[in-house]
Amino acid sequence: MALNVSLLLMNLFLPLRVLLLTSSAMIVSCSPPAFTERGMASYVADRYAGHATSSGEIYHPQGWTAAHNTLPFGTQLKVKNNYTGQSVKVVVNDRFPHYPGRVINLSRAAAEAIRIPYMQMADVTVTAKTIPGQQGQNRGSRQNAPAPQPPPGYGAPPASYGAPPAGYGAAPPPGYGVPPSGYGAPPAGAGTTSPPAGLPPPPSGYPDLR
């Protein structure tokens, strides 16, 4: 009799347990990203292949990496091309010079994966589920996402640097976010993630977040 009562109770509580587990999974999956921003993505030139990045890693055009100026090295990002709707996952391992409106610099493989024509730019949305060392903290927009500050003087032009042209850094021009004419038709040879001639493949363990 006692065994039957126990089985009955287990059967009664089983749906409740399933509901609680499902609800927990939904809460986790629907949690807001730790970081999000929108702007232009640029394309790392092949001439930097084999050079050391700011993190000390060697840049490989066929690696799934990116340069970002505030997020810690090792941050995993999802980059969505707002022109095509395609996304790619990359890991931050470098910095790059500041340009108004530009938020990320993608490896050749990552740029081509989301159909950015060779050496062009695209309007993208960048998101990170978590930031290394700060998981679960300060979720929200870019302004609320904690990040290491650039060193003193970073981004300051040299004394001899000329004044920017009129309108430089102003509001985006009309049509910003609209793909340029012919976008999506890369030149001959684009659309491959194979390395330039003579460049060895990335070393074992190099980030591959496809």
Image (spheres, grey):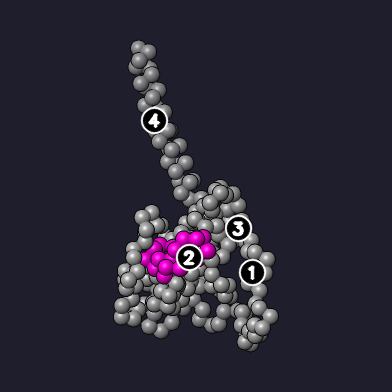
Q: Position of residue 184 (x, y in %)?
A: 36, 77
Quadrant of the image containing the C terminus: bottom left
State the residue position of label 2.
52
Examine the rendered structure and indicate whether residue 50 appears above or below residue 148.
below
Q: Nearer the viewer, mark 3 or mark 2?
A: 2
Residue 186 appears at what percent x and percent y?
35, 79
Q: Which residue is mark 1?
A: 154
> Which kind of residue does numbered mark 1 sit on?
Tyr
Q: Is residue 80 visible?
A: no
Left/right of residue 188 with respect to residue 128 in the rendered view:
left
Mark 2 crowd level (few <14, some 14–19, many ≥20, 10 Å Cα) = few
Query: SS class of the residue under badge 1?
Result: loop
Q: Earlier in the sequence, mark 2 or mark 4?
A: 4
The mark found on residue 14 in the picture is: 4
The image's mark for residue 147 is: 3
Front in this rendered view, residue 183 or 71: 71
Q: Residue at x 67, y 69 (%)?
A: 153
- Mark 3 surroundings: few (<14), some (14-19) or many (≥20) residues within 10 A: some
Q: Which mark is residue 73?
A: none
Could you give the CA–CA distance between mark 4 and mark 3, rounded to whole angstroms? 44 Å
- Magenta range is 49-68
